[in-house]
Amino acid sequence: MKAFMDENFMLDNEVSEQLFHQHAKNLPIIDYHCHLNPEYIARDHKFDNLGQIWLEGDHYKWRAMRTNGIDERYCTGKDTSDWEKFEKWAETLPYTMRNPLYHWTHLELRTAFGVDKILKPETAREIFDECTAKLRTPEFSARGLMRKYKVETVCTTDDPVDSLEHHLALKKEGFEIKVLPTWRPDKAMAVEDSNSFRAYVEKLAQVAGLSISRYSDLIAALRVRHDFFASVGCKLSDHGIEEFYAEDYTQAQIDSIFNKVYGGKELSQEEILQFKSAMMVEFALMDAEKGWTQQFHYGAIRNNNSRLFAKLGPDTGFDSIGDFNIGKKMSKFLDRLDKNNQLAKTIIYNLNPRDNDLIATMLGNFQDGSVAGKIQFGSGWWFLDQKYGMTAQMNSLSVLGLLSRFVGMLTDSRSFLSYPRHEYFRRIMCNLIGVDVVKGEIPYSEMDFLGKMVEGVSYYNAKTFFKF
């Protein structure tokens, strides 16, 4: 019986161990998609205690606590202390065995704080106090944690109207870790609510310094902001969509739809889909012109619990996997761009694992030899960001594409303690390959190449692909 989370955690044989320890373990981290607050990095935020850094905004933990019968006041409540919330998390954690939260929690304790105790009610106070004391030292500030994990580059998630003032401040200061913005223009095509859309467009007009009264003005203003993001070092866009949009439309139709929604009238479902389809193409063209990489996160059904959404707002733990039919629309969208040689480097992340093979085969349709792995199957996302989800994604990519050209892992997190997810991924990948070697399905004589392959997926592929 193996010890829990020893140095060979999740590594089942000597080949897996060799691949991880010699080729993956010590490489820097490129976190090309996350939701870190750039202000925290700019002012080198100090965290008050372990409860704050762990539970503030973490809807993964909130979902588990609610499921364990913990009252909402210990998740999102304003009348409970960080310690009280942490105590309830420690009460919940033993019940998360076989959930990735159990592994993530103990990896973070060990790699960040050097704590190898099991978190449970009996150890909660001791662990809270020990980690809180460390968090109050300079080495455990926002920047200190990034340095500790050998982070080289992070890409935050930013709206076109954002000032990027903190990115600019970090750039001017010469902070040694690259902190780059990512263009996330979802609100610019969110025409489901005409009042919210108009308010957003008016804000966009203000920051772009342009008057917007028609569709072409909207695109011009977005281009101004796209150029600004590029000047601050942006190299990626990101789009959070339910499904791919690829309706047929004419320019006259889109002009009319914009006038209608900007004038305060609600759109039909057909008009909404046509407008989103047009905007997806506009965004893709901007990215292709600048050589950016476009990312598509699709497939979530968000805010399912209307009662608690009204009370707590979005991103509080009430989203789930969706079951959208996306194959034909995805193909049509990609082909619409490719036929005019305007398809940018692309990463597609699915939330429903049933789509793994669909995506893995779709990639091959649009690889054009210009860039290795130009169209990428993104790593296991959100509910699939765990051992079985990541393994399934890599298996589909392996048998239907090229795992060796994969740009690897990201945290997709708001927490400065989430970097061990890169280690978790690297261990799983090394074990996946190592098991095949031991079974005789990959030749042991090719260990030199396998070592380079592991290094590529862990770090070098992303560095080359994004040109960081």
Image: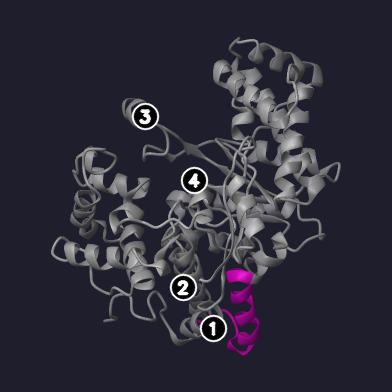
Q: Which of pointers 4 and 2 indicates the residue nearer the eye?
A: 2
Is residue 466 magenta-colored?
A: no
Q: Mark 4 and mark 3: span between their CA atoms?
A: 23 Å
Q: Which amino acid does label 2 sit on?
A: Arg
Res. 352 mark = 4
Where residue 207 sits in the image (x, y, percent)? 67, 31
Q: Name the residue under label 1.
A: 440
Q: What stretch is highlighted in magenta?
A: 438-459
Res. 309 mark = 3
Q: Which amino acid does label 1 sit on?
A: Gly
Residues at discs 3 and 1 in contact (Cβ within 8 Å): no
Instruction: Give 207 or 55, whichever is nearer the viewer.
Output: 207
Q: Which of pointers 4 and 1 indicates the residue nearer the eye?
A: 4
Task: Give the main secondary structure of the magenta stretch.
Answer: helix
Furthest residue toward bottom: 445
Residue 35 seen: no
Residues at discs 4 and 2 in contact (Cβ within 8 Å): no
Furthest residue toward front: 173
Residues at discs 1 and 2 in contact (Cβ within 8 Å): no
Density class for disc 2 (Cα within 10 Å; few <14, some 14-19, many ≥20) is many
Q: Name the residue under label 2.
A: 427
Density class for disc 4 (Cα within 10 Å; few <14, some 14-19, many ≥20) is many
Instruction: Give 380 or 332, whichever is nearer the viewer.
Output: 380
Q: Which of pointers 3 and 2 indicates the residue nearer the eye?
A: 3
Q: Mark 3 and mark 1: span between their CA atoms?
A: 52 Å
